[in-house]
Amino acid sequence: MMRNGELLARHAWGWANAERRLAFTPRSLFRMCSITKQFTCGLLLDSFADPSVLDDALRAHLANLEQPAPSVLQLCHNQSGLRDYWAVAMLHGSPAEAPFGEVEAARIIAATRTLQFAPGTRYSYVNQNFRILSDILQERSGRSFAELLRSRIFAPVGMESAFLAADTRAMPDGTEGYEGTQGTGFRAAANRILWTGDAGMGACLDDMIAWEWHIDATRDDPAALHRRLSAPVAFIDGTPSAYGFGLARSTELGRSVIGHGGALRGWRSHRLYAPSERVSVVVMFNHLSDARAAAIDLLAAVLGEERPKPEGTHPAPTWLGAYVEPETGLAVRIEAASPGQIRLRYGYPPEELDLRADGSASNSSGTRLRFSEGGVWMDRPQENQSSRLQPCESTPAADVAGRYRSVELNAEFTVADAGGALYGAFSGFLGQGRMELLDAVGGDVWTLPCPRALDHSPPGDWTLAFRRSHGGRVEGVEVGCWLARRIAYARVE
């Protein structure tokens, strides 16, 4: 924790590698994961005053795209409209611990034919946006991404041991990430992804302190790198965006905060900077606890405040239930949670919303549910989206078993009736996925869980919206999750 350029606390505890009894220190190397994205964008801005000069190079990476391509800046702001490649990998049948390197990534990216929304109109978190950026930077400079980061960012800032830790199987100093709990026991997490500009950075706590010091020391310089990274960003309609250049903008404890998290199975981290208070917080866990929540708790401690708690006095609304969001086609389930809160299952992970006196429910991310004009509306300003949800009231028919094929992905989806219980699984060039039990939502809408995936955050529940002919026979299904929406499959048997 830092304030006004002064280090308030620098503390490490526990084990970097429990089997080898390597204690954590501020010099232990750590997987920073998606915190990498701001450094990728920083390298882009440091290398090109006008990133749009790389737009043609981006189009070359999406040679099969049948729609207008996004711009390089729209990649930086997660407004590209691309589907996340780790989510799409699961549709190709990838096991959670499967190898996923340059060949697999290039094949999925190059095969892109359609977008899930028009570039610049919406926000969706897409990891390969930043992988493509790092690939283009390498191609244009003739130097490796690792070398570019070292010479242009890490060394000038004073991040002495930071490096590109692209291979997620091991860290040079033996630091390990763990899955499990104190009750069930911990085990070393198996990861076999090759990461670059999306999540490949390795660094120690002292490296991250150097980055926070640099941010604070250059806070009044309009040309400073972090000032440019944290500049206001908007959608193409002019609506302000809460995400840009690999950084999220939010309000915590009444203050504007800029930061980002990072995660992989076994690793969790979060860094934030509150400009008005000149406060920085960095949290790094090699286990699966909530690093963002810990960072906000520490911010509250520095500011001498308490995090607000739900009032707990407002009754659950009458509009709990199952719906479909019409633009994305995704299932929306609204459930009772702890007193004063409801749970929204739409993206990943489920969101807790506080009930308000006016009958609505909202959270600090901006998501809001409200009853208006005879229906339930979901507002997600962080995604530039507001829509009236469509109720799913009828009981789904169970005649959906069969084999389905996606022409765009060249992949298949199988639904099997196993003694009256429906199971589904994906298969493609990455393998044959495991069978998972389908969950009925309503109408012809089901969900298929994806509790584990290549990335730390699995796609969550895939929405399955089955399509029928005029005669009532199931003839296809649309598959989607928040990371990868509206992929059409036709029934083949």
Image: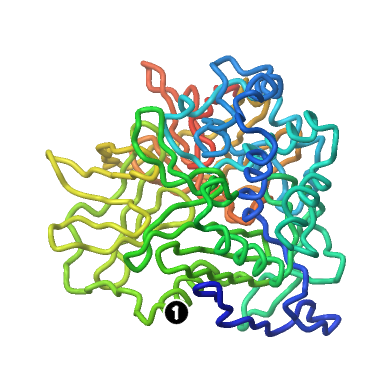
Q: Quadrant of residue 306?
A: bottom left
The residue labelled by disc 1 is: 302
Specify whether residue 419 is in view: no
How many labels were placed on the picture?
A: 1
Q: Quadrant of residue 218?
A: bottom right
Judged from the image, the secondary structure of the residue bearing numbered disc 1 is helix
How are the colours assigned in the image? rainbow
Q: Is residue 218 above or below residue 114?
A: below
Q: Is residue 145 left or right of residue 218?
A: right
> In the rendering, at what x and y percent does residue 225 appear?
60, 49
> Residue at the spot x=78%, y=84% of the render?
23
Q: Quadrant of the C terminus?
A: top right
> Residue at the spot x=39%, y=58% of the render?
351
Q: Is residue 178 left or right of residue 355?
A: right
**Disc 1 packing (10 Å; few <14; some 14–19; many ≥20):** some
> Residue at the spot x=48%, y=30% of the render?
486
> In the rendering, at what x and y percent does residue 253 appear?
34, 68
> In the rendering, at what x and y percent does residue 187 appear?
74, 73
Q: Kindly identify the amino acid type of the residue bearing the numbered disc 1.
A: Val
Q: Is residue 404 above or below residue 218?
A: above
> In the rendering, at what x and y percent does residue 143 appear?
85, 37
Q: Is residue 421 left or right of residue 30?
A: left
Nearest the eye: 33 or 222: 222
> Residue at the spot x=68%, y=51% of the render?
199
Q: Quadrant of the N terminus?
A: bottom right
Specify whether residue 132 is in view: yes
Nearest the eye: 389 or 51: 51
